[in-house]
Every structure is written in structure tokens, then in C-alpha cells.
Image (cartoon, rainbow, N blue to C red):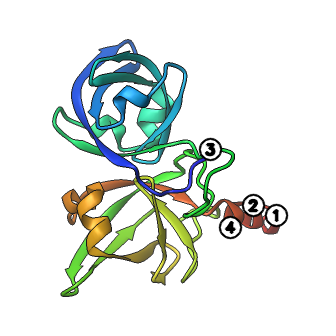
Amino acid sequence: MFTGIIETLAKVEKIEKENTNVHFTFSSAITSELKIDQSVAHNGVCLTVVKTDGKNYVVTAINETLKRTNLGELKTGDLVNLERCMPANGRFDGHIVQGHVDATAKCIEVKDLNGSWEFVFEHEKHKNNITVEKGSITINGVSLTVVQSTSTTFSVHIIPYTFEHTNFKSIKAGSNINLEFDVVGKYVAKILNK
């Protein structure tokens, strides 16, 4: 389980395709602390560390993961948001994040609010894709609060700290992002849709 509180950024060093899988080599400030078999969220996608080597480590994404997320769009040099699993005795600062991306969404607008930024996203209409004003949403692994919500769009406001310490600084109109909708909302929607 994750919380959506980003620890650091990881840089894509190498991308290798093997059949339908893709092996991503990343470098990060916490690589020396990572262990093989450890789950780490990359832009909100839970991936297993399969190799470590000095400042670099490797994770593998299967075809299903590549189809459902924005990881297949990564290029060498890109930055991803990184979070290790929450320790059992750790502080719970964000919200319940599973590391299971539900969908991608497109950024349709970024507004500079002179002290913060408003990002507006559009996603496909689906009975489980629910956002609620003042509810939780995970964007590229970042735990955020929904500001405005419709059946296919929502907005969030980003403070300067989050803008500088995550890959929000590289999101612009047209960018695809990973979404994990609030787990409680997903279960409620499933029950109500039965």
C-alpha cells in the first residue's frame, strides 16, 4: 500500500524491450536503499525491483501495465514520481493508494494562479471513474484533493512545493497522466451498480 506522498524523482536511464515486456532502468537518490523484490510506485504504478547496480535499478512492466498506464510513453531522461510502500509503523499522510492505475487521463488545461497552479484533466466516462469535489484522487502517484468534478473532467490545485518536487512541472496541456481513483469510491460505485 502507498500513500501518494512522493519521496523523490527517478530518471529513466535506459529502456529495453523484450517480447511484450519493457525493462526500465532508473537512477534515483534512494537506489542504494532499494532491494530486489521490493514494490515501488513509479508514477503511481506498483512495479517490482528486479535488479540493482550502483546508482541504477531495474523494473519490468508487462504489456497489461503498458496498455493501462503512461509508462509506455516514457523516454530516456524523463522523470517519474517515486514512492516506496508505506511501512506498517509509518505515518499515514496521504490517502489509501494501491499502486493500481485505473486509467490514463489527458491534461486539457494548466492555469497559473499566481502562487499555485490549476490542472484540469479529462478521462473516459466509466461507471467506476468517479471523482468527488474535495475527494481524493491519485495523479502519477501523487495524492491530491479534487477541486471541481464532472463525469469526465476534474481539476486539482498544486502548491509550489508539489510542483517543484514531483513531475507536475513537466505536465502541460496534452500530457497523459496515470489516474487511480479513490478506492472507497470505487467500492461504493461497484455496490451501487449491482
Between the residue at mark 3 and the residue at mark 1, the CA separation in whole angstroms equals 30 Å
Report which residue position mark 1 lands on: 191
Residue 102, image x, y percentages: 54, 51
Task: Give me the residue at 68% from left, 67% from top.
Answer: 185
Look at the picture and state if 183 lies above or below 30. Answer: below
Query: Disc 3 or disc 4, which is closer to the eye?
Result: 3
Neighbour class for label 1 at 10 Å: few (<14), some, many (≥20)? few
Front of the two marks 2 and 3:
3
Quickly name the residue at label 3. 87
Tell me: 24 left or right of 47.
left
Q: Earlier in the sequence, mark 4 or mark 1?
A: 4
Q: Residues within 10 Å of mark 3 (few under 14, many from 20)?
A: few
Q: Amino acid at mark 2?
A: Tyr
Query: Quick check: 190 above or below 75?
Result: below
Reading the image, the residue beneath label 2 is: 187
Q: CA distance from mark 3 to mark 4?
A: 24 Å
Determine whether label 2 and label 4 are within 8 Å by CB: yes
Q: Secondary structure at mark 4?
A: helix
Q: Which residue is mark 4?
A: 185
The relative height of residue 151 versus residue 45 in the rendered view (above or below) is below
Nearer to us of marks 4 and 1 is 4
Side of 12 relative to 38 (left or right): left
Q: Quadrant of residue 70?
A: top left
Three-letter amino acid code of the residue under disc 3? Pro
Q: Are marks 3 and 1 in contact (CB under 8 Å)?
A: no
Between discs 2 and 3, the one toward the N terminus: 3
Where is residue 93, by image quadrant? bottom right
Q: Is residue 174 left or right of residue 135?
A: left
Residue 121: image location, x then y, percent: 36, 69
